[in-house]
């Protein structure tokens, strides 16, 4: 028999698919794990029990979270639910706004922010701007394109009818009747504007599919029939903008309901002016994306260049600066983006992360000097079993964690350091379903559905349970209330730094067996660390019996270790004089090597030799594991 000693010092490949169990030759195999649940990976290689979730508030229902940063000192969380937005600052709701978006609209919303204004659009709802003024007052109003002193509205126009359709006005000024050569008008045209021969008319009423009336804004040249006519692009009849962003001091609108593959760029420095003018450098720009496939625009993003993500491909819009004469668009890759839901792209160190159209891949859109073009690398290739229909994403810059909320209620987390070649996935689970995620300042907020309620919570590095509230009393007490959001649930309790037995919340109250001055009460969650089975070790192979003799776990700031070495889960003493019991006294975290012996042979080399699994609300960090194996030759 031969003895083999291995040291695993890094988990920087994260959880990888079981389909790679036969690929021990990969570097990722040695740096990966079979299962990583409710842990965060450090770029240095170790991992830690994820932060707990602190309870903030219960909200009206399902919805979406949006971050709003007024300045570095004032950040806000906007909670969008059915027909309303709740605005929070530092965990306190400060106002509620009435909105036009129903719950069905929320999953397709797209937004961008500049200074004190947040622009939100949906292809079926008139776009809105949410503003916070210098006095701290919040308001929501529809977008309004620039109307100059002569009453001309500088908005995009387009002829939706066939080129041969003509319009005949019965006058050149005042109130006129427009007669079309075929059926082109709809009752929803009332209240919109048209241009005939380049002159604007404000449509006031609908008479028939061929006749409308309106007020002339600019005197017409003649009353002759003309095919030179257009109608406003964005309206209740033609639909509204799909996506929006700011780039090179222009407002960029990408797609609308009826023109899904068209781009509009405002005049430089004048974001509500879309007048094409005479094509001068600072004037607005518009064009369609035409190619051999459908290219409904799903996102516009300001990166190294203006990037356009469509249903079938990814595009680069160039021009330094962008002008009507210099603008060019080139297709870069053919991946495509989600069509049934909006998940906004996010920038990480110059790379744009987006969700592929198939809903199973997370792609990194990055310009490479070698190719002199963009590439869309799949950063989830080794962990595609974790990625299933992402519905939201947010990047935690402080911890370098990219969170993806999945439609099954879990949340996949990517630790990403490109220069250090760290790309590691883990999966976060909670007692309920994650619905949305947003980062405001340094805080990561989530919207969670638990037991019929919808709650806002945020990751708190000082707690180790979910939906948690802390309490403090001058006189030690056994009764703690204010837990209505957890009513009827069994919660974990840490009182005066001692882990107490779990209790049920009844009428928003828990009663402890012993009085305490400080408590931390929340829902338990379980973290799991399961390594990949040994592979490509001299002497091992299919059918050969292998035995784990011992394992040395190097832990840091750890207060509990529950381990399965093949004989079931058991609490492991962290000190030489401990007996493994953690419920009878305060536990101070330790940083040391823990040696655990093992017994028993195994012929199944598709299973892990050890497993850490615990829901104890105490800190845990694992830096490395050294194992000694015996192989039956």
Image (spheres, helix red, strand yellow):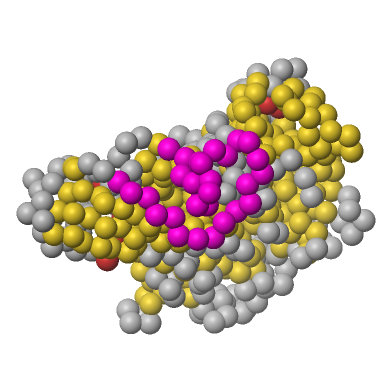
The percent coordinates of residue 5 (x first, y second) are 25, 63
In depth, the one of 212 and 261 nearer the eye is 261
Tell me if I can see residue 519 in this picture: yes
Residue 92 shown left or right of residue 440 in the figure: right
Relative to 185, residue 332 above or below: below
Residue 95 shown left or right of residue 238 in the figure: right
In depth, the one of 599 and 79 nearer the eye is 599
The percent coordinates of residue 290 (x first, y second) are 39, 60
Task: Read off the magenta span.
Answer: 570-598
Tell me if I can see residue 446 in this picture: no
Q: Quadrant of the N terminus?
A: bottom left
Which residue corresponds to the image point at 33% horizontal and 49% vertical from the top-left? 597
Which residue corresponds to the image point at 66% horizontal and 44% vertical from the top-left? 586
In depth, the one of 5 and 25 nearer the eye is 5
Relative to 131, residue 466 above or below: above
Which residue corresponds to the image point at 45% horizontal and 34% vertical from the top-left? 408
Residue 198 included in the magenta stretch of the image: no
Residue 96 shown left or right of residue 487 in the figure: right
The percent coordinates of residue 313 (x first, y second) are 37, 58
The percent coordinates of residue 613 (x first, y second) are 44, 41
Furthest-front residue in this view: 577
Please tell me whether the stretch drawn in magenta is mainly helix, strand or loop: loop
Relative to 583, residue 89 above or below: below
Q: Quadrant of the C terminus?
A: bottom left
Which residue corresponds to the image point at 50% horizontal and 52% vertical from the top-left? 576
């Amino acid at each position: 028999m031969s003895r083999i000693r291995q040291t695993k010092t890094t988990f920087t490949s994260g959880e990888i698919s079981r389909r790679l169990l036969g690929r021990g030759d990969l570097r990722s195999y040695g740096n990966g794990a079979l299962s990583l649940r409710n842990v965060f990976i450090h770029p240095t290689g170790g991992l830690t029990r994820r932060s707990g979730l602190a309870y903030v508030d219960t909200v009206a229902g399902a919805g979406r979270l949006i971050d709003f940063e007024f300045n570095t000192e004032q950040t806000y969380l906007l909670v969008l639910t059915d027909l309303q937005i709740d605005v929070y600052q530092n965990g306190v709701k400060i106002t509620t706004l009435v909105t036009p978006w129903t719950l069905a609209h929320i999953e397709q919303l797209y937004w961008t922010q500049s200074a004190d204004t947040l622009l939100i659009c949906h292809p079926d709802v008139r776009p809105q701007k949410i503003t916070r003024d210098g006095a701290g007052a919040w308001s929501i109003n529809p977008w309004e394109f620039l109307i100059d002193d002569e009453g001309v509205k500088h908005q995009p126009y387009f002829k939706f009818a066939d080129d041969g359709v003509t319009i005949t006005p019965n006058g050149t000024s005042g109130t006129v009747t427009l007669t079309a050569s075929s059926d082109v008008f709809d009752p929803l045209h009332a209240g919109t504007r048209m241009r005939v021969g380049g002159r604007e008319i404000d449509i006031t009423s609908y008479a028939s599919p061929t006749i409308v009336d309106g007020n002339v804004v600019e005197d017409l040249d003649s009353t002759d029939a003309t095919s030179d006519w257009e109608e406003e692009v964005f309206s209740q009849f033609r639909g509204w903008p799909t996506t929006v962003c700011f780039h090179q001091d222009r407002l960029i609108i990408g797609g609308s309901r009826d023109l899904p593959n068209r781009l509009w760029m405002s005049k430089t420095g004048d974001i509500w002016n879309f007048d094409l003018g005479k094509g001068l450098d600072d004037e607005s720009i518009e064009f369609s994306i035409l190619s051999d496939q459908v290219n409904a625009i799903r996102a516009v993003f300001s990166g190294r260049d203006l990037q356009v993500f469509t249903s079938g491909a990814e595009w680069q819009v160039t021009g330094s600066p962008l002008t009507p004469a210099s603008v060019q668009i080139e297709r870069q890759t053919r991946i495509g983006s989600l069509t049934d839901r909006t998940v906004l792209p996010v920038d990480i160190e110059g790379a744009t992360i987006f969700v592929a159209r198939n809903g199973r891949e997370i792609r990194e859109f990055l310009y490479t000097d070698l190719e002199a073009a963009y590439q869309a690398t799949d950063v989830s290739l080794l962990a595609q079993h974790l990625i299933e229909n992402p519905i939201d994403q947010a990047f935690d810059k402080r911890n370098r964690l990219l969170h993806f909320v999945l439609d099954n209620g879990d949340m996949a987390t990517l630790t990403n350091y490109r220069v250090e070649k760290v790309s590691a996935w883990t999966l976060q689970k909670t007692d309920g379903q994650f619905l949305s995620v947003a980062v405001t300042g340094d805080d990561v907020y989530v919207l969670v559905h638990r037991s019929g309620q919808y709650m806002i919570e945020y990751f708190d590095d000082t707690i180790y349970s979910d939906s948690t509230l802390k309490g403090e009393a001058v006189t030690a007490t056994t009764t703690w209330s204010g837990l209505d959001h957890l009513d009827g649930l069994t919660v974990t309790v840490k009182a005066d730094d001692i882990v107490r037995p779990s209790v049920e919340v009844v009428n928003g109250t828990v009663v402890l067996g012993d009085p305490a001055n400080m408590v931390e009460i929340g829902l338990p969650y379980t973290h799991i660390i399961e390594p990949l089975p040994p592979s490509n070790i001299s002497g091992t192979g299919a059918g050969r019996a292998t035995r784990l003799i011992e394992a040395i776990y190097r832990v840091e700031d750890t207060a509990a270790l529950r381990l399965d070495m093949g004989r079931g889960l058991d609490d492991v003493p962290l000190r030489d004089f401990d007996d493994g019991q953690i419920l009878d006294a305060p536990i101070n975290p330790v940083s040391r090597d823990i040696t655990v012996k093992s017994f028993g042979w195994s012929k199944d080399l598709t299973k892990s030799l050890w497993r850490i699994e615990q829901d104890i609300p105490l800190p845990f960090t694992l830096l490395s594991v050294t194992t000694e194996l015996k192989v039956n030759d």
